[in-house]
Image (cartoon, rainbow, N blue to C red):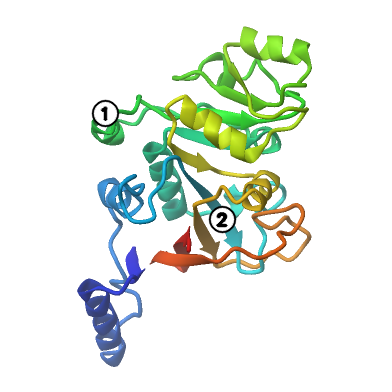
Amino acid sequence: MRRLFPVTDETADQSIGAAARERADEAPGADAGREWSLAELAAAYAYPEPAAPGGRVPWLRANMVSTLDGAAQHEGRSHPISSAADMRIFGTLRALADVVVVGAETVRQEGYRPARERAEFAGLRSSAGQGPAPAIAVVTASLELDFSLPLFTSPLVPTLILTGAAAAPDRVAAAEKAGARVVVAGDGMGVDPARAVQALADLGHTRLLTEGGPRLLGQLVAAEVLDELCLTVSPMLTAGDAQRIAGGPSVPVPRRFELVSLLEEAGFLFSRYRRS
């Protein structure tokens, strides 16, 4: 993996080295970059400190993947357009988070399981005052979920259900019976994104990560509660009618984000944008 932005002395050295190899007719990319350690990835993706310029509590970041032609999925799942490096970053972002926020349809489509404890991040989480693994928070109006799945019956930390005050009482009871904690974050059937973020913060979860899907991310964008987007650009073309990374109604005025980091490995670009 190599860092393309921000430009550093190391970035410049890598560029010079690549040019020299090509002049010498050596195989391009023969030494394009080593695999970064999990500790290096954790440092590269660290959450901003609350006191840092632009920092805020809570902080909500999204992690998504897209093909060159804008597809967020292939045949309904994101895994086919991912890579080993993308999955390392996926795991690192989870390890840094207090809670992973995900839409109910993504839970169903991707076969979500509880976040697991990882020994490589145990010390980092302990020093940050975090538990052994992030909680999973499922956003759902209907609570039409299979509560017999491990996500609900055997998580390391209880799974959270974010729903509205008008959710069906029998589904709420089923969720609680399975061991999930139901959190009301809306006055009607649905969830208000801003209330959801605040409700999680009230539970002590200030380092928030969402993995979509597109409908949920679109709602977060429209509500202007998204602070950061970690977007993997996959060097693939899929055509078809797959969803973009964010769906739903357009916003009245597009919100501009600024690039803060860009990494590359095997043609995959790993970008990190923050609201400007």
Residue 265 in view (yes/no)? no
Taking depth in this image into account, of 168 and 212 the one nearest to the observer is 168
Apparent side of residue 212 relative to residue 156 in the rendered image (left or right): right
Q: Residues within 10 Å of mark 1 (few under 14, many from 20)?
A: few
- Helix, strand or loop at mark 1: helix
Q: Quadrant of the N terminus?
A: bottom left
Say which amino acid is labelled 2: Val
Residue 95 disc label: none
Apparent side of residue 237 relative to residue 89 in the rendered image (left or right): right
Q: Which residue is mark 2?
A: 65
- Helix, strand or loop at mark 2: strand
Q: Which residue is mark 1?
A: 126
- Which of pointers 1 and 2 lies earlier in the amino acid sequence? 2
Which of discs 1 and 2 lies nearer the camera? The answer is 1
Do callouts 1 and 2 mark residues in contact (Cβ within 8 Å)? Answer: no
| Looking at the image, residue 205 lies above or below residue 167 | below
Residue 264, horizontal then vertical, whole percent: 40, 66
